[in-house]
Structure formats: C-alpha cells, structure tokens
Image (cartoon, rainbow, N blue to C red):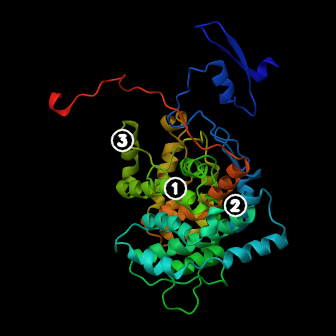
Amino acid sequence: MADETITIIDNRTGERSDIPIVNGGIDATSWRKALPDVLFTDPALMSTAACESSVTYLDGGEGILRYRGYPIEQLAEHSTYLEVAYLLLHGELPTAEQNEVWIHDITYHTFIHENVRKRFLEGFHYDAHPMGMLVSAVAALSTFYLDAKDIHDPGSRMKQIVRLIAKMPTLAAAAHRFSVGMPFVYPDNSLSFPANFLSMMWKVAEPRFSTHPVLVRALDVLFILHADHEQNCSTTAMRTVGSAHADPYSACAAAAAALYGPRHGGANEAVIKMLNEIGSLDNVDDYIAGVKQGKGRLQGFGHRVYKSYDPRATIIKHVADQVFAVTGKNPLLDIALKLEEVALSDDYFISRRLYPNVDFYSGLIYQAMGFPIEMFPVLFAIPRTAGWMAHWVELLEQDAKIVRPRQLYVGHDKRDYVPVDQRS
C-alpha cells in the first residue's frame, strides 16, 4: 500500500525507489541500494534505530514505559527487582517455582573472590571514586571467570549473568566502604536482594543488620524503575562492545563507564547540586527567571525521549513520600516541590515540554537514605545490569553484526608528505 512505503527520488538521475515502512522504520539497506553514494548523518543517533529489540517499549510522547509489554506502573506496584530482572532476561514473568530457583541462584552468587577484594579493590588510591572502582572491578571479573569467553553457550551465558547481577551490589558496597575507610561486609544470604545491599553498605558491629521495610521496598522500586530504558547511552555502549563478541563482564564494564559520565548517570547528582545552589524557597522564583534568561539549567526536567511527564517520576514521587515519613523530610524537598509547582505552571517550560523526570526525586530519596552523592551513579548501575544483559543476550541471539558506523569525511584532500626541514 502507498501509505506503507516511502518514495525516494534522486533528482540527479530521476530514479525513483519505493522503500517499505516496517514497524515504524525503514531499512537502511534499502536506502543504500536506492542511493549508494549518500549516507545519513545522525551524530547522536537521535533519528536512527540501531537495532530491533523486544526488551523495552518506550513512547516518549505519551509517557509510556513497558518492560516486555508490562507497564512500569504495574511492575513498580506489584513486582520485585529480581522478578523484573528475570522478566527482562527471559521475556516472561517467572512461575513460583522459577522465581524461587532464580532468587536462590542470585542469593548464593553474591560473594566475590577474595583476591578481587584484597588484591584489586584495596589497591585503589584511598580517595578513589566508587564508580571508577566499580567500572574497573566489573571488567576485572572477566579474568576470574574464564568460561565467560564461551558466549555462544546459553548455559555459560546465564551463569555469567547470574554472577553479574548477584555480585554487582557486593562490588558497589565494597567500593563505598573502601572510599570511607570502613571494613568490608560479607553478604548475608538470609536477606532479600535490596536488604542485603543495605546491610553491606551500613552494617557496623551488630550481629545482623536490619532496616525499616519501607526503605527496603523503596530501594527495590527504584531498582525496578532503573532496570532498563531502551537504547540509552550505556546500553548502546554495551551493544557496541558486545557486537565484537566481548565477554559479558567487559561489555557490562563498558556500559558502566558510559554511565559514569555526568550527562548520563550523574543527572540526579546535578539536581541535588541545583537545589543546594537555590538554597531556600525565597530564591526559587529568581532561579526560574535566570533559567528563562539562559543563565542556568533546570536540572531534573525534560528528557531526550520523554516529551510529557516521565512515568517513572510519578511513581518515584510517591515513593519519596513514603521514605520521608520514615527518615524525616529532606530539607531540600520543599525547594523541589516549589520548583516543580512553579515550572509546571509556567508556559515557558510547558511549551518546551519540560516536565520532571526520574532524576528529579531519586537523588532526594538516596540522600535521605544516607547514600553519599558519589554513590548515585553506582546505585544506577546495580539494577541496570539486568537490562544491559537482556540486550546482550538479544544481540547474540540475533547474530547481530559488529557495530561499524560510517562517517562523512570533512578533512583535507590528498596531500604530499613534506620533510621536516622544509615545513614552514
């Protein structure tokens, strides 16, 4: 049908080509056949679908986010992070029996090799950033599990995935403890996934660490919300490295390295810094005016993909209320609430579709729970591991080609070499 194709007319030759539209996109190979000497230029891949994926559906215009078809709102209300991780990896929610086995496997792979801790992590400088330590430690795991190179064996793949999801909180907590000069805490297999992480973070001398169940559940929900988010920067980095058939630890480390960048994993840290800069409720109006004059940015508002309210932001705002009822209100909350109120009633921001995103409140929650700002990207990496690995498995099962984009060359034409003594 005519409305299911796009027509390309080369005005240089008059040749016409009809290219089918499939799943809302056109095949670049068809474009190349029609115009073999013309390339698309899309530096940030804003208009390019680099792959086909069935993991996560995202509609930025409508504010929709679904994992394997399940709305994020339902998963955040009813599910657990480990159940969602299973869903992302296997495509279906687990049965009761599958869920029990899955939780057991993750729980009993949380320990890390003693040499990772004693000879690797403890070798970092005393003030090393926890995220830098995490990136390096994840990459180093590939040297401890040589079977990780067998990426074409489904059994071996799943073994590495279990190890990664299980050990990521252990490595994260170890990086934090090292950065603040506290002794390493071993995992407690009697605790749930989020409670175990909190134990490894905060336990001091008590025989068994326990915390308020509201905080445990809040962390679990935050992990669910951050488990995957389609083809973001870190997932794209992972897919690029994974397409070279690197082992999963190396691919995951590449993704974590991308997440380390402040444009990606540091957004909630930027929100905290902005709120501290504003300082008080009396300064909100002046700050908003400054943003409109181009003197600053409204951190935590707007999104590359979402052009309406980020569905995760609605969920996380409710979680924030529950957390603050336990920890006491974060002193920056009133500033955040007024900032949101003023921005959402101002045509300047409404017309630009600048609505709060997931980062606007997540940093406040993490701060209220005691996490230092340096740990914010680490807290992002822990749950996103499941999403990264789901995409890694998918690209292998699709037998995806190695990523090798083209470029539009804008440099010099051919030049002849000039000996050094003749150069001016």
User: Observer-nearest residue: 69 or 253?
Assistant: 253
Q: Which residue is mark 2?
A: 76
Q: Which residue is mark 3?
A: 290
The three-letter code of the residue at mark 1 reads Ala
Dot 2 surroundings within 10 Å: few (below 14), some, or many (20 or more)? Answer: many
Q: Which residue is mark 1?
A: 254
Q: Are marks 2 and 3 in contact (CB under 8 Å)?
A: no
Q: Is residue 174 above or below residue 355?
A: below
The three-letter code of the residue at mark 3 reads Gly
Instruction: For mark 2, give the secondary structure.
Output: helix
Instruction: Say which label, 2 or 3, has the lower sequence index.
Output: 2
Q: Is residue 202 above or below residue 420?
A: below
Residue lying farthest bottom? 207
Instruction: Say which label, 1 or 3, has the lower sequence index.
Output: 1
Dot 3 surroundings within 10 Å: few (below 14), some, or many (20 or more)? Answer: some
Instruction: Say which label, 2 or 1, has the lower sequence index.
Output: 2
The three-letter code of the residue at mark 2 reads Ala
Q: Is residue 79 above or below residue 396?
A: below
- Residue found at x 40% / y 37%: 292
Q: Is residue 419 left or right of residue 373?
A: left
Which of discs 2 and 3 lies nearer the camera? The answer is 2
Q: Position of residue 159 (x, y in %)?
A: 69, 69
Q: Position of residue 30 (x, y in %)?
A: 69, 25
